[in-house]
Amino acid sequence: METGSERTRQASAHLHACSPAHAHTCLSPVLRVSCSCLWAWLWVVTAVLLPADAWATTFKVAVVGPWTCDPMFAKALPDMAARLAMARINKDPRINHGYWYDYALVSEDCHSSRAVARFAELKGYGDAFYGPFNPSVCSAAALMTKNWHAGLLSPGCLDPNAHVPDEEDKSYYPALRPRGPYATFTRPLPLSAHVLFQVFRFFRWAHVGIVTGASELWEATGQELASSLRSLGLPVAVVATMDADDNGARRALSAVREQDAVKVVIMCMHSVLIGGEEQHQLLTMAMHMRMIDRGYVFIPYDTLLYSLPYQGVEYSALTNDSTLRRAYDGVLTITQDSEDRNFYEAFRDAQASHEIRSTADPEQVSPLFGSIYNSLYYIAMAVEQTRSDTRRWVTGEALANSKGGFEFEGFNQQVHGGDRGAGMQVRYAVLDTNGMGGRLTRTHMLEPAHTHTRFGGLKYLGLSIHFAGSSPSSESYCWFSPYVACSGGFISYCSILVCYCSYVFYDLPDSLYVSLSLALILSLSLSPSLSFSLSLPLSLFLSLFLSLFLSLSVGLSAATLFFLFLLLCLLAGGGVALAIRNKCVSLSLSLFLSLTHTHTHTHTHTNKHAYKYTQTLPVSIVHLHLRCKSSAHAGVCWQGDWVWLKKCPNGEQVSSITPKTTTIINQLRDMRHENLNLYVGLFLDASIFAVVTEHCSRGSLEDLLANQDMRLDWMFKSSLLLDLIRGMRYLHCRGITHGRLKSRNCVVDGRFVLKVTEYGYPSVAEAQNIALEEPKPEDMLWTAPELLRNPKPSGTYAGDVYSFSIIVQEVITRSAPFCMMDMPAKELLQKLRSPPPLCRPEVSLDDAPLECIQLMKQCWSEDLDKRPTFEEISKHFKQINKGKKTNIIDSMLRMLEQYSSNLEDLIRERTEELEVERQKTDKLVAQMLPRTVAQALKLGKQVEPEHFDESTIYFSDIVGFTTISALSEPIEVVDLLNDLYTLFDAIIAQHDVYKVETIGDAYMVASGVPNRNGNKHAAEVSNMSLDILHSIGTFRMKHMPDVKVKIRIGLHSGPVVAGVVGLTMPRYCLFGDTVNTASRMESTGLPYRIHVNQSTVDILTTLKLGYKFDVRGSTELKGKGHEDTYWLVGRDGYTKPLPVPPDLTGG
């Protein structure tokens, strides 16, 4: 455990030094009694004279988290975050009115059982606790802090019953119960399940799955999150744990894929954007399993806990890994929104002001740093508010009773305090990527109610989400309503109606019985006015009605049963009508359209009013947020997909949809062709009547041609024209004329497929008795001359062909109709109406194939009989391309093939370079840590300490190093050590030993660790020691060649424990008495001598390799007493000369 700031300790020591309890330590026994009286009088005077704010006491917060066992949590730098928060809190004039705030950093074990036991030992560590992060520990921690009268602010408590903010929320979430064991608990942030619920409700995604990391913390998080979402009514179908082996990701995703309804996956693990390796493996595997392309959406959970930077930030994890970049296109990131600066910028600002005394790269710090800072600041604000209101000293349990409503500047965002212990209220953002780069873009925003835990609806920000494949299908809104059940309906009643029919029509012939039964069932199930989701009261009413009818029907005649059935139907119909009138039935009429939570996509100002209209005809309930009522067109988002509204003029005159319009819309919806923009339905709301069609992301053909950044070769142009020909040929074959064909009414989708739109629009307007507005002269340049003279709203076949020829001119020249004529549109129309001379556009023969220009001129012929049909145009156009298929995708593929060979070579070259660099990195890491340990750390696994029963430890030291350093320049000392240790490193490479570390002039080596080698460890270290002693005899310093370098060597054998210490620059260290004894053997040795202990001599003797020893005798070892030790002087067959040691006379 680490304590707080040095300033806090000094203040505490000062208070103790001035207290009466410690005064006698400075006085003689004679004066103690009088001194005590004096101190008593001083306290009385102080209490009378000093104001209340002058009293001082320490309020300590224990910051509990898996800081040591989880490297990703350690990247949040909790100690630095807490120190910064406390420094600013104690300087804040709004807060520091008597309390001195301090913190204690406590490590939470990653194993749940040990974490609970560890937390039980923390009594007295703080007046309030931030943490734990493990949901399994939450309940126990809440009970213990309640008993300790301490506050608890835990991000790991996901139980929705843990906190009830106020009575209003109790009514909204009836399952919540009073606090009970959570009396001192405060939720630091809104419940994650509530945030996710709002997002799912907006997109109408009900069926979700959860994949958790392998650690117990993430497993418990996934289970608690699933329970919390289920309490809100969402069907969480699967909670799969991703094991740490190679196939863990595949097994977890296979479990999700087995649930057909699940298309949304919540990932409870560290985000890959901050270095989470598990999420990297999961998303990469999802890419390989084609889940990204098939419409699965992945949502990271941990980003809900902090503010992930996105403004101006490009994540190298995405830019450097093309597979992950494509996989992350299927990820929707929900995180706390930031203000003008993101987390990285705030961290750099704190570094620049020296508030953070660290040179760490902000991008290597977890944004959880900011959440820790904000939570500690919130605790101080809540405590001070409660103390100010009550004018009394308060304890940590007062956190749950904070009135809230305050605001403060968080680390990089504005934070609001929710009322009655509701915790911090922040804004959330939905981030998306397009799969092309490493940047995230904000598409939606979730605004909190500042003093409540409930959220308003998700707000669309004008940027649609880019789904890698198809978006998940929208589900029934009943999943998100607490009053509507998502089962039942008339299908379940049809089986009961069959029983009725068997009673009512029992005496009728079989054929008539079957006909009447089917007619009754179909009329009820297919009636638009009866296709609704039943609420609970209505379901019970109909069930009672059916049961009553069955009970009364026994023993009655057919005629009596028939009239009784009609009477009960009238009563049931009246009940249904009354229920609808009282809004007990949630209508979901779905013949045409269900626009829920939609937003317009026009470049106008926002209108905050939402218009609601319930249509009794087969048009659904619409909740549409309109920005501009005057715009003729509007793109809106319906169930997560874009649709297009074509508004009809004088819509305020439309009060209902006529049956004729219904028939026309049904016919138009049945027309399905690749080059027709499909009708979705009708929209009637807020004095607006509009036709709803599919949305095409590329806009109209007019927009595409005006975009000079889009390169259009002839293959591209001919493909667009061929799509137009196919669409118009289909319409004419179905007996439908367009009448309003122009480039503005041809739209292009994301695959560059052209589609004809607004066909049948005049018929819809006529059926609704809507008079179309007089078109502007600029909009009539596509109209055939004969129609200018004798207008026909529905148009003619020949008129559509003329309009097609004008569009051909637009495509060839990429300019507006008749742009080369240089005259006003009104004058052009007059010339078109009254030839001669014939007025037509002028097109250069170099802009397109000659055949195409001739076909265009034939299509705008003044003689209607000379104009070809679209069937003939299609044949001529194929001859123009000489039978070649004009497909834009094929054209793009041909362009890509030109670069494929070079790209393959480049990829191969880069892959080889990457492999070389990887090998260099692995080699470097292997030189610093054992290979097995390095591999575990790279995978993010915890390296458990390991016990070794047998090992031999080597220590050596340079004799007189202090004197040498004093006589040398620092750079010369560095060169000396580098030359010497390079020599030693070359020697140890020839033996089965492991270099543990070098500290100054000390050199430490071990054998038997980390690779066990039986009892050979003593021999390996002894042989190495002899070789080092041999080499040191000829070693000379560059700057002092006449001075010999002498070393002392000490050896000892025994058991040790090895483990990795630290997360930043981790070290593989050895612990145990064996290490201490080996160090004592070196320090009590002599120059040019190998000092060995009895344990090492015993092992070398059993090996019978001819090692030679001289008895030194009894030697005093610090902390060990006197022991017999020996000098290792050689070995049979070892012929290398050794330096002559100094004389031992007298030793």
Image (cartoon, rainbow, N blue to C red):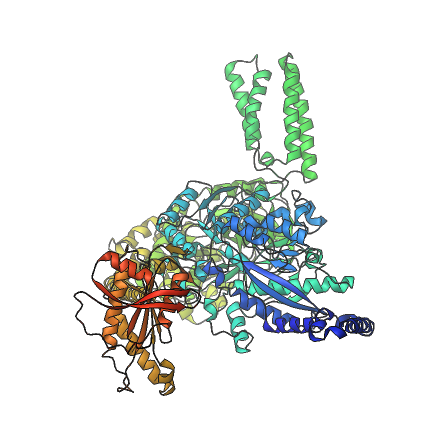
Name the spot of residue 107 as percent of width and height, x first: 53, 59
The quarter of the picture where residue 943 lies is: bottom left
Considering depth in this image, is 170 or 805 the residue closer to the camera? 170
Name the spot of residue 979 as percent of width and height, x first: 28, 78
Q: Say if 933 sits above or below 685 in the image.
A: below
Name the spot of residue 232 as percent of width and height, x first: 59, 44
Q: Say if 264 sits above or below 465 in the image.
A: above
Q: Say if 696 sits above or below 15 in the image.
A: above
Considering depth in this image, is 290 or 979 the residue closer to the camera? 979
- Residue at left 63%, top 74%? 10
Q: Can residue 750 be seen in the rendering of this structure? A: no
- Residue at left 64%, top 40%? 483
Quadrant placement of the C terminus: bottom left
Q: Say if 798 sits above or below 850 in the image.
A: above
Quadrant placement of the N terminus: bottom right
View extreme (front): residue: 1146
Name the spot of residue 138 as percent of width and height, x first: 58, 50
The quarter of the picture where residue 482 lies is: top right
350 left or right of 1111 in image: right
Considering depth in this image, is 64 or 314 the residue closer to the camera? 64
